[in-house]
Amino acid sequence: MNFPENRVYLASRSLRRRELLKQIGVKYNILLMRETINRPADIDETPLPDESPTDYVYRIVNVKATEGRTRLIQRGLPLLPVLVADTVVTIDGCILGKPQDAAHAQEMLSTLSGRSHQVMTAIAVAVKEKIQVRLSTTIVRFREINEHEMRYMISDGKIFDKAGAYAIQGIAASFIVEISGSYSGVMGLPLFETTQLLEEVGIKVFPE
């Protein structure tokens, strides 16, 4: 399938995902599930009982992709591919989402301190009635992080919309001893898998 505009909808508020798409030359329009941030979320991202991290991210991107396609139809927008993503941090089989407050953020960072964890980012592209999904899993190992460093990270307020209470492109980079996998995947959009998936649905990456 080819799309003459060679353009997708990106269903995400993440500035990092927008920047990463630009790096590979993909044109996009932003598709917001809800018009204002204060409006209740359309998608409940609470993990189900006994749901594994892998099952969780697959479920969430499928739901996001389905909802994104529904929004196109409801709003009478061109039926271009809809790209969605979801990132979670996991350790000991537990899912660490976005921290609720400073105490929760410090609890997460304490759990990650001096240990290895996984960052899982699933992406999905919805084209008409079909949804295709890819998963990127990266192992990240932190050195010990002391309380002063945790408080410093939390104080700038930039980690409250980040899974696991950190951004790899931020202060947390100074704590990383080792990373095995996709750096862009930890940022929120694994470019290897994204490139593959977009090309499979007819979106040309690195256009002339």
Image (tube, rainbow, N blue to C red):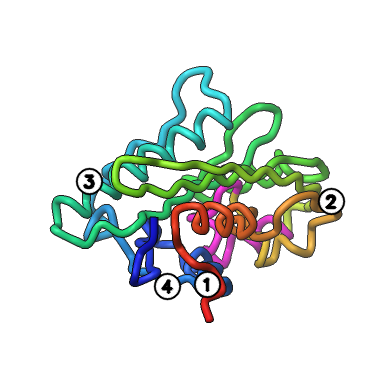
Q: Earlier in the sequence, mark 4 or mark 3?
A: 4
Q: How many badges with numbers are in the image? A: 4
Task: Estimate the spatial distance between the alpha carbons at disc 1 and disc 3, rounded to whole Å.
Answer: 25 Å
Question: In the displayed structure, does residue 204 sit left or right of residue 166?
Answer: left
Q: Which residue is mark 1?
A: 19
User: Marks 2 and 1: which is nearer the front?
Assistant: 1
Residue 171 appears at what percent x and percent y?
69, 66
Q: Earlier in the sequence, mark 2 or mark 3?
A: 3
Identify which amino acid the numbered label 3 is placed on. Answer: Thr
Residue 103 appears at what percent x and percent y?
56, 45
What is the secondary structure assignment of the residue under circle 4?
strand
Q: Which residue is mark 3?
A: 70
Q: Residue at x 67, y 43 (%)?
A: 137
**Viewer-nearest residue: 88 or 124:** 124
Count neighbours of disc 1 (C-alpha within 10 A) and say few if under 14, some if 14 to 19, many if 20 or more.
few
Residue 79 appears at what percent x and percent y?
25, 57
What is the secondary structure assignment of the residue under circle 2?
loop
Identify which amino acid the numbered label 1 is placed on. Answer: Glu
Identify which amino acid the numbered label 2 is placed on. Answer: Arg
Task: Estimate the spatial distance between the alpha carbons at disc 4 and disc 2, rounded to whole Å.
Answer: 38 Å
User: Marks 4 and 2: which is nearer the front?
Assistant: 4
Name the quadrant of the N terminus.
bottom left
Question: In the rendered structure, does residue 152 fall within the stretch colored magenta?
Answer: yes
Task: Estimate the spatial distance between the alpha carbons at disc 2 and disc 3, rounded to whole Å.
Answer: 44 Å
Mark 4–mark 3 contact, CB under 8 Å?
no
**Which residue of the protein is positioned furthest toward the top in this rendering?**
50
Residue 8 appears at what percent x and percent y?
38, 63
6 in relation to 95, above or below: below
Give residue 148's quadrant in the image.
bottom right
**Viewer-nearest residue: 6 or 66:** 6
Task: Estimate the spatial distance between the alpha carbons at disc 1 and disc 4, rounded to whole Å.
Answer: 11 Å
Task: Estimate the spatial distance between the alpha carbons at disc 2 and disc 1, rounded to whole Å.
Answer: 28 Å
